[in-house]
Amino acid sequence: FSCEELTRHYLERIQRLDTAYNSFISVTADAALARARAADAERAAGTAAPLCGIPIAHKDIFCTRGQRTSCGSKMLDNFVPPYNAKVIDNFDNAGCVSLGKTNMDEFAMGSSNENSFYGPVKNPWATDSVPGGSSGGSAACVAARLAPAATATDTGGSIRQPASHCGVTGLKPTYGRVSRWGMIAFASSLDQGGIITRTAEDAALLLAVMAGFDARDSTSVERPVPDYTEHLSDSIEGLKIGVPAEYFGAGLDAGVGAAVEAAIEQYEALGAQIKTISLPHSNLAVPAYYVIAPAECSANLSRFDGVRYGYRCDNPKDLADLYKRSRGEGFGAEVKRRILVGTYALSAGYYDAYYNKAQQVRRLIKQDFVTAFTEVDVVLGPTAPAPAFRFGAKSDDPVAMYLEDIYTTPVNLAGLPGLSLPCGQVAGKPVGLQLIGNYFEEARLLNIAHQFQ
Ligand code: GLN
């Protein structure tokens, strides 16, 4: 079939099914079809790049030139960027066909997609339940086969946790592997772009396009991009898998625990050696993350002032009124909560007690992993403590919502790569298995995920 037929297939599914899931904020059908026809011409001429004509959806946090980029917020509902994110350029240059932009929690703050200005995304496996967040639209559209793959971002779990809840594969690369240029900033020392796909093989193909050095991102790492597909089929005989005792304590759903145990047995049968390890500071990751991420967000979101970008209130009396009402009307409740927590933690008199302390804890968490990787090749555990919960179940309790991120935030605080792959179900809802690798060991994670049956 042609690239145009392939694109039409997905556009038709989006049109027919996404009224139920709400996984897209914008669908760019005309541009997609034009790009697909160009891809067919390139294929006929023999000039096509390997991924030429492959449809993809992009999280609405990546700036797209001439196309609205909302970040799930009223603040940017009318924002049309004049430039592309590096990630978007990379996929465009590889010949991919963008289907549109996916729904997300406002400014990527959330674990359920209930914080989107455009309404929640429904989990395709159980539409009374959340898809996870913040990349809920990207995970749900891949799960519902509305797109073969979608870009996403992960600051504290936003690729892995929605992938887990939607039964798809989500890869958060090492911090610095994928350029943050043009990716709207939440917490810059934690934010990392990545990919949600059906399989590890698809993730390997797409990461190769997405990754790479970019001088415009000061934390981008200059290091060659390997062929991530090369080792997919390697045997994992003798591989040392570390299972952290702290990831199986109280708070883990019994069904999720059983699915992860079954996965461990399967890896043992494939010849891996399983070793119980300790990540002693794991329980401090959520409190440290929920100081550091809001602190950075309060600084990053100061740019949305009603003057330079996005929403501006009607008839401001003076400049102070313009700032106050534009921000007051443009941001949702969770974003405001984070800005308040962040400015408090950074204020004189509290900085040492909160922000500095959280940074010290962050170093201890990283050190736990550095020590673990002297003993094992990879760390394995659950991605999320329980399967997808029902809408509203945690909306009034931010701490319960934040505890969704208990197994994912340590990975961001340490800057390591993490991958979630489907490993079973509990009462018809998917369970995700998390693999955590040493720095730049994405290929190893993809290999281990690919070996899972
Ligand atoms: N759920 C976490 C938060 O709300 C992580 C979000 C993310 O990774 N973008 O901050």
Image: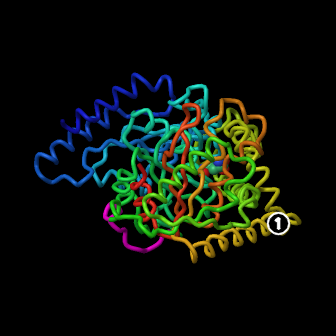
* Residue drawn at 51 percent across, 70 percent down: 377
Mark 1 Cα shell of 10 Å, populated few (<14), some (14-19), many (≥20): some
Q: Is residue 213 above or below residue 158?
A: below
User: Picture coordinates of residue 436 (x, y %)?
Assistant: 54, 62
Outermost residue, left side: 45
Magenta part, dominant SS: loop
Q: Which is nearer the eye, 106 or 7?
A: 7
Query: Disc 1 residue type?
Result: Tyr
Part of the protein shown in magenta = 220-230
**Ligand 1 within 8 Å of the CB at mark 1:** no
* Residue drawn at 83 percent across, 69 percent down: 352
What residue is shown with label 1?
351
User: Picture coordinates of residue 43 (x, y %)?
Assistant: 15, 47
* Residue drawn at 51 percent across, 66 percent down: 273
Give the quarter of the figure containing the N terminus: top left
Taking the magenta stretch, the answer to whether it contains residue 9 is: no
**Is 307 displayed left or right of 346 in the figure?**
left
Whether residue 175 appears in this view of the structure is no
Whether residue 194 appears in this view of the structure is yes
Outermost residue, right side: 349
